[in-house]
Amino acid sequence: MASCLQVGMSSCIIPTTWTCSKSLNKRNLKTSWCAINTKNTAKLSMTPIINPKDDPFLSKLASAAASSPETFLSPPVDSDTHPYLDLFDSPTLMATPAQVERSVTYNEHKPTTPPPDLPSLLLHGRIVYIGMPLVPAVTELIIAELMYLQWMDPKQPIYLYINSTGTTRDEGETVGMESEGFAIYDAMMQLKNEIHTVAVGAAIGQACLILAAGTKGKRFMMPHSKAMIQQPRVPSSGMMPASDVLIRAKEVITNRDTLVQLLAKHTGNSVETVANVMKRPFYMDSTRAKEFGVIDKILWRGQEKIMADVAAPEEWDRNAGIKVVDGY
């Protein structure tokens, strides 16, 4: 076999006659290894495939076969042992395709580790994003992220991005209890960190309260975002008894009064003013939200200079020669 590995694959002598001895016992059956009969051999011609001298593994295998042929005549007893790999001190196996795929880095300045999910990357930048209605699962995640960021560093600010319709859907259907919004609000009030709130898209109902509850001077809004405050809605009563409907109605009124007081506290308006505008849905663009006290600044590059240069509507009418007949 050593000569086979040394001379190449073009001509190799392989045994064709095998003599096996078997011995039977009543208790167990043992089969001895087959002995090679080297007298009767045949020559088999094969097309050359690879030169052992060019392959490190085959060259190592050939030298081992020449020095100790008994290693190859006695196969390993342990089936878990890969054949001939013990010839190398530290054999190196090729990585599987899955291992190669997972080793791709997502940042050249970071270690080559599997890329995390997007919320984890945002959380690493101390960003918490509310992009869904305030249902229990969302509330649980937001509060957990806020507590985790405070535990990581109680002095660094937390950036809370809001694009949520609160405890209702766009069409007004109730999807969560008002306590979901109050739970996030209470967690924000308990944190030691500054919380920078940013409205992107929409901040409606309880989401508007969360926007206004940010640190004073650190409440922002994108230029085309919308904020809206409205009264809480009574969930669907269905086949509920009249007494239970009354109980729910009283709870909704209590939640409305609490929401009015909190909005008045963070916007700087009186309770009566907030209660009056909340009689119907009160929509606010970024400019109106700033005037109402929901936010402190509009996040638009160069927006402050542009708005300062824009003339008031009355001045436009006066320059155009338009005379206002009535207040309407």
Image (cartoon, helix red, strand yellow):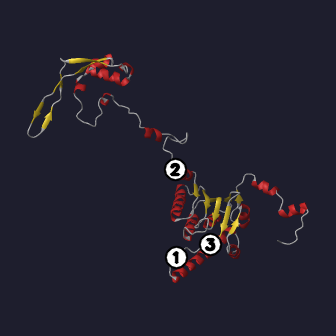
Mark 1 or mark 2: name the one nearer the start of the chain. Answer: 2
| Residue labelled with disc 2 | 117
Q: Which residue is drawn at 89% across and 64% down?
A: 322
3D distance between C-alphas at marks 1 and 2:
40 Å
Neighbourhood count class around disc 2 (C-alpha, 10 Å): few under 14, some 14–19, many 20 upward: few
Q: Which of marks 1 and 2 is in front?
A: 1
Q: Which quadrant of the figure has residue 72?
A: top left
Q: Which residue lies furthest to the left in this view?
A: 26
Residue 266 placement, left or right of 184: right
Q: Which of marks 1 and 3 is in front?
A: 1
SS class, disc 3: helix
| Residue labelled with disc 3 | 259
Mark 2 or mark 3: name the one nearer the start of the chain. Answer: 2
SS class, disc 2: loop
User: Percent x, y for residue 323?
Assistant: 90, 67
Mark 1 or mark 3: name the one nearer the start of the chain. Answer: 1
User: Percent x, y for residue 99?
Assistant: 43, 40
Above or below for 130 versus 260: above
Return the residue nearer the eye: 134 or 217. 134
Residue 50 placement, left or right of 12: right
Residue 69 placement, left or right of 134: left
| Residue labelled with disc 1 | 238
User: Percent x, y for residue 15?
Assistant: 22, 21
